[in-house]
């Protein structure tokens, strides 16, 4: 099983120079490969494969005095660059992704490089190929398992990070056969999370504030003249606000997911319909902000690790407009309606809680179908 952690690293000035040059080499390979590929296709109609013909060009280039400098850098990171180019083309050709044609990488954007040989890490430093000294790091979690790869990155704020991937040999705890604590969860807009007991977790204020701050900084950026120094400054502020929001959100999601996994034996969620909802402009912002997908992912792996059931029911269940008491289904229920009365059994429903209860019921059916007993 793989486990990834992302940590902040603190290269000294000399190491920063090396890392920036390393990112530059990776970017150089990517951009050259993209250029050659586009050129061959346009001029000759030849479709070169990034991971075959173009990758092979790296070692050819290194033999020329002009490109000899590439030898100073981890060759795996350079090869990985062509794999990333292939991914960018795969996304471009995939009808679902709606990606644009691969673009040249810019020095100003996010930088990264991948390493999987001659690497090491301990609780306070990491080691990467071709750099003799170790880079200071802040590892906030105990290290378990065998280190498989390090992906270095530099955010547009100038901070350096490393994503460490570990192969962890761990036998997952067995999940209970008989379940007594089971809850359904609905992800909301006005509240972050609503469970089938009606408990609502509001969007935390610090997240709302961080979002507001990001919007403010983005607005200010849009007013700056292109190419001006002020625009560069405003860009950095946007990047910082974005980084702050992402970190705060991640932290919040980790804590909340841990808490609900601790409290339950089975957790039921709906599959997310984000690809459909994304097309609705107004909702897209909220969904992006709440980052539900990454939250559910955290719940899922934490549940696996703790020996808890994680169930995702069909996204087509009309969980909001079905009465969780008698099963009566409304024709429609506009998003603005927060409370409603079932015309069949006259139960007064809180929209979100009712949805949570339906999600829970559907999940229990799935669990029973798999042979588990549920008494809750
Ligand atoms: Zn009813």
Image: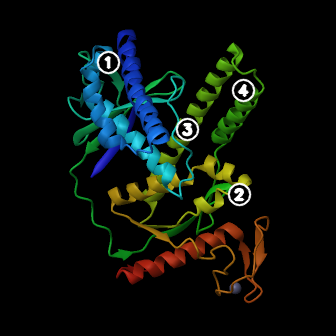
Q: Nearer the viewer, mark 4 or mark 1?
A: 1
Q: CA distance from mark 4 to mark 1?
A: 38 Å
The 10 Å Cα crowd at callout 3, few under 14, some 14 to 19, many 20 or more, is some
Instruction: Provide residue 179's location: percent of width, then percent of height.
Output: 39, 74
Across and down, in percent, residue 376 comes to 47, 77
Give the vertical position of 359 relative to 134 (above or below): below
Residue 67 got which mark? 1
Image coloring type = rainbow
Ligand 1 found in image quarter: bottom right
- Residue 95, can we see it? yes
Q: Residue at x 46, y 32 (%)?
A: 35
> Mark 2 = which residue?
280
Please tell me which of labels 4 and 3 falls first in the chain: 4
Marks 4 and 1, the one that precedes in the sequence: 1
What's the mark number on residue 31? none
The x, y position of residue 332, in whole percent, is 75, 77
Residue lying at the far bottom in this picture: please name it.
344
The residue lying at 32 percent from left, 68 percent from top is: 175
Quick check: marks 4 and 2 in contact, CB under 8 Å?
Answer: no
Q: Which residue is mark 3?
A: 246
Say whether residue 74 is visible.
no
Between 91 and 11, the one nearer to me in the picture: 91
């Amino acid at each position: 099983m793989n486990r990834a952690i992302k940590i902040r690293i603190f290269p000294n000035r000399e190491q920063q120079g090396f890392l920036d040059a390393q990112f530059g080499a990776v970017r150089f390979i990517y951009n050259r490969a993209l250029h050659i590929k586009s050129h061959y296709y346009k001029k000759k109609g030849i479709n070169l494969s990034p991971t075959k013909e173009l990758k092979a060009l790296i070692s050819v280039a290194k033999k020329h005095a002009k490109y000899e400098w590439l030898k100073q850098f981890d060759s795996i990171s350079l090869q990985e660059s062509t794999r990333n180019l292939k991914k960018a083309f795969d996304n471009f050709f995939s009808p679902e992704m709606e990606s644009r044609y691969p673009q040249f990488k810019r020095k100003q954007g996010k930088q990264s490089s991948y390493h999987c040989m001659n690497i090491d890490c301990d609780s306070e430093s990491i080691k990467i190929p071709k750099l003799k000294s170790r880079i200071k790091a802040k590892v906030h979690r105990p290290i378990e398992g065998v280190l498989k790869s390090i992906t270095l990155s530099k955010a547009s704020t100038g901070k350096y990070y490393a994503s460490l991937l570990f192969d962890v040999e761990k036998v997952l705890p067995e999940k209970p056969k008989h379940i007594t604590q089971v809850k359904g969860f609905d992800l909301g807009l006005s509240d972050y999370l609503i469970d089938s007991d009606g408990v609502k977790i509001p969007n935390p204020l610090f997240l709302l504030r961080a979002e507001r701050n990001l919007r403010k900084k983005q607005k200010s950026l849009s007013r700056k003249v292109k190419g001006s120094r002020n625009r560069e400054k405003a860009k950095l502020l946007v990047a910082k606000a974005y980084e702050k929001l992402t970190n705060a959100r991640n932290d919040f999601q980790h804590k909340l997911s841990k808490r609900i996994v601790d409290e339950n034996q089975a957790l039921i969620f709906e599959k997310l319909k984000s690809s459909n909802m994304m097309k609705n402009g107004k909702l897209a912002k909220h969904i992006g902000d709440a980052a539900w997908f990454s939250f559910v992912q955290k719940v899922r792996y934490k549940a696996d690790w703790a020996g808890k059931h994680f169930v995702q029911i069909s996204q087509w269940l009309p969980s909001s407009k079905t009465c969780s008491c008698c099963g009566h289904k409304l024709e429609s229920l506009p998003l603005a309606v927060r409370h409603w009365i079932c015309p069949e059994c006259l139960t007064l429903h809180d929209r979100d809680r009712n949805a949570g209860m339906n999600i829970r019921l559907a999940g229990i059916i799935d669990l029973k179908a798999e042979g588990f007993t549920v008494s809750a």
